[in-house]
Image (cartoon, rainbow, N blue to C red):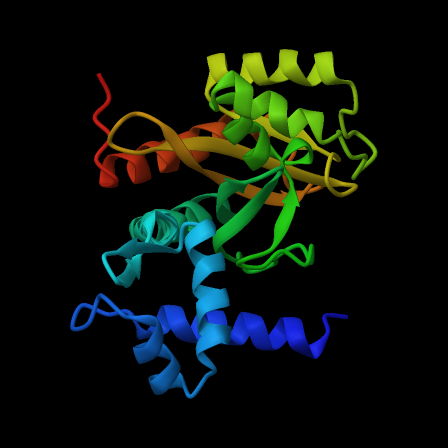
Amino acid sequence: MLNEGILKSVHNGLSILRLFSNEKSNWGITEIANVLSLNKSTVSRLVKELVEEGFLEKSGTTYQLGISVLCLSGVITSHLEIFREAKPSLHKLVARVEETAHISVLEDSNITYLHKVDCKQPVHLMSFIGKNNPATCTSSGKVLLAFQPTEVTHRVLDNGLPKCGPNSITDREELLQELQAIRQQGFSICVNELHEEVVSIAAPVKDYTGEVMASVSIVGPSQRMRKDQFPEYIKAVTTAGQEISKKLGYIHH
């Protein structure tokens, strides 16, 4: 449990950041202390920590928002754009394959679901928007890892390969070989890797620069998603990935 002092510091630090706006982008220590009814020494200490972390920067005798805030806002803007542009394609994909579809992004060693559209008979996997799953056990995660710079992929693998389902790959070299194959073929299939008797198939989503920034996937029970249907599913998922990529400005040459 966090103690009350730490929670109060976090609350006060966020209150300081919220003061900055287009109308007033520079604040001094005394001004902040007066508006928030805080002790000047408390404000001075918090501002110093925010400067060290890059959330604020000194501008003469006042302070303004730093680069860390811009980085966070860039992530949010990019995620919102994917969410908005992917919705129609996800609904179309679900109607076509009659299985649940997700849009996911890579965050550290996990994937995070940005959007989910359920089919009429969804598998109760407890997946929901905002949920994290290990990247190495999911088709979405493998697609994202396959198209990352080598150092990013190795950094994720350095954190270990968890055994989530009966078919999870826990051997590093085996997984690296599979990621290479995924990069070449442009899709990933996972059977019984995150959950038993569950199949997921994913394809990359590219931005206007050609970088893979998200993945689109379908997931369903293995008794419905049979192996003889995989080619049809792969075509549907890769088509959805291409559609969303096009909406994000990617031009296929």
Residue nearest the observer in this picture, 223 or 54: 54
Q: Residue furthest bottom?
A: 37
Whether residue 99 can be seen here = no
Q: Residue at x 70, y 25 (%)?
A: 158
Q: Is residue 114 above or below residue 13?
A: above
In the image, is 7 to the left or to the right of 96? right
Whether residue 15 can be seen here = yes
Residue nearest the observer in this picture, 180 or 222: 180
Q: Is residue 209 above or below residue 62?
A: above
The quadrant of the picture occupied by the C terminus is top left
Q: Is residue 73 above or below residue 158?
A: below
In the image, is 25 to the left or to the right of 125? left
Q: Residue at x 55, y 60 (%)?
A: 120
- Across and down, in percent, residue 146 comes to 53, 22
- Across and down, in percent, residue 52 comes to 46, 50
Q: Is residue 83 above or below residue 182?
A: below
- Across and down, in percent, residue 229 comes to 57, 30
Residue nearest the observer in this picture, 42 or 140: 42
